[in-house]
Image: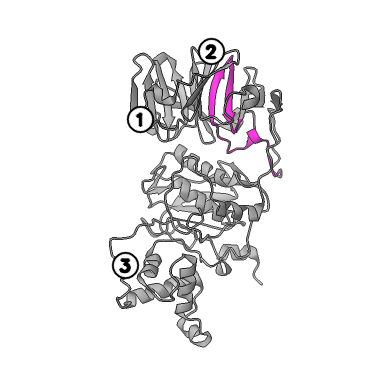
Amino acid sequence: MMSLKVKNLLFPVLVAFMCTTFSSSSPVPPDVKINQDAQQLAESYLKQYYNMSSVKTRSKNGNSVSEKVKEMQRFFGLNVTGTLDSETLAMMKKPRCGIPDVAKYSTFASKPKWPTNKITYRIVNYTPDMSPVDVDNSIAMAFKVWSDVSPLTFIKINSGTADIMISFASKEHGDFHPFDGPSGTLAHAFSPGSGLGGDAHFDNDETWTTSSRKFNLYLVAAHELGHSLGLDHSSNPIALMYPTYKYVNTNGYQLPKDDVEGIQSIYGKPPAKQLTATDQEETSVPTQPQTTKTQATTLFHCNPNLSLDAAAYLNNDVLFFKDGQVFRKHKNGSLTVASIQTKWTSLPTNIDAALNWSGRKSIVIIKGQDIWIIDNLGRVFKDPRLKVSSLGFPNNSPKIDAAVNIEHMKKILFFTGDSYYSLNARTKQMKFGNKISVDFPGIGSKVDSAFQLDDSYYFTSGPLLFQYDINKKRVISTQQISALLGCQT
């Protein structure tokens, strides 16, 4: 009997995200006779995705086209008629992935999984459509979608063979499953295993973006990596693992319940955080965390996919805010942690942004439309009249992702989505609509936090920290946030 390992190599998981729009041709009306092309389309579709046998075999076992059409209609939630009506033919014409939809015929029927919770990945090459930083961030955040709801930890390596090798390729690319040019199949991946197992390939003939234009790499990769981890497709149209591509707002994206239940059925729930704040004081954090690869979990701040909510400078220390906790990086290099509400009871549990004020002697905290000020003695002040909208934003004030005070330029920058606003501290005039990727080349298209330390400015995007030369508009250095917090990855 063929082993599961060999099967995984012979039956790759062709995971494709497709555009949900069609050509301009109209679907076949229900009262129009189905032509030969439509009949051939249906037979080919049902053979590939619903295990319909050949005409010769069907004549012996009664496995009719009608029954397979009903199966397909049930999966997609269509009107179950067993006939090739216009709605069914329209669904068949949609670009889609290459694996079967019905679970008992799926190449994932045996539920393959990785034997360890610590999984490595490597990005072998890059698409010309995006900067390498944006690609790195998109892939890292796609992994984070799954690590947030499972015990899995993903570690990026830059050389050698990783568990999951990620690459961009066109047409025939060495795995016997060539891409088909623009549109159609966007990507495919292989189920967990050795060799090609877990690898994800993206069609280089597509246009990849960080926005709603064309195909959003983050969303496509998140779906693809679900397959790399052992998930098959879901018939729930809201699920990330639904066969067809649909853009959704990626800001604060939360994995749908269907996908959470799917990944947890394979790997279980995420462990409790190992690093927590005490009720009364800051806790010292080890600067040399465990690095054994066989470990199932790691310290919270040593997660290689760790991103930040906000950062600021106070009393010679840098404060990093994440998930209701504040990490204090002391000037001597030591690190302590406390819950935000243990330190400052009047602050909200989670915050959106922070920036320094008054010569870095105080911190402005932003959450939604509300603003608080922490002075150098650690006291918190809040004026209910002071709101984000009062700073000069348009009527519908945006959610602030990050902010930084560029003191020598007399400017305060507010980052939101892929743009930023610039407030002139002298004239109190607000400048709108600046693109992050254009004015800050090299740091990506989204900023999670920003701060000044000594004479340098720092920006974080996803799991990466960028030291940036504001005057020359260039990145000086890049490192992982977990490394900044004393971890070896």
Q: Nearer the viewer, residue 397 or 433?
A: 397
Residue type marked 1: Asn
Q: Residue at point 71% right, 28% down?
A: 278
Which badge, 3 or 2, is on the more N-terminal residue? 3
How far from the left and from the top, in percent, is residue 108?
A: 58, 63
What residue is shown at x 52% (from left), y 87% (from top)? 60
In the rendered image, the vertical position of residue 116 relative to residue 487, given as above or below: below
Residue 237 position within the rendered picture, expressed as x and y whole percent measured from the top left: 47, 57
Q: What is the number of the mark on residue 361?
A: 2
24 lies left or right of 464: left
Based on the displayed image, in which of its 4 quarters is residue 1 positioned?
bottom right
- Of circles 1 and 3, which is in front? 1
Mark 1 surroundings: few (<14), some (14-19) or many (≥20) residues within 10 A: few
Residue 473 visible? The answer is no
Instruction: Give how far across and how far down residue 418 sits, in percent.
Output: 40, 35
Q: Position of residue 335 (x, y in %)?
A: 66, 24
Q: From mark 1 to mark 3, how far is it between C-alphas?
A: 43 Å
In the rendered picture of this protein, how many numbered marks are placed on residues?
3
Which region of the structure is painted magenta? 296-324
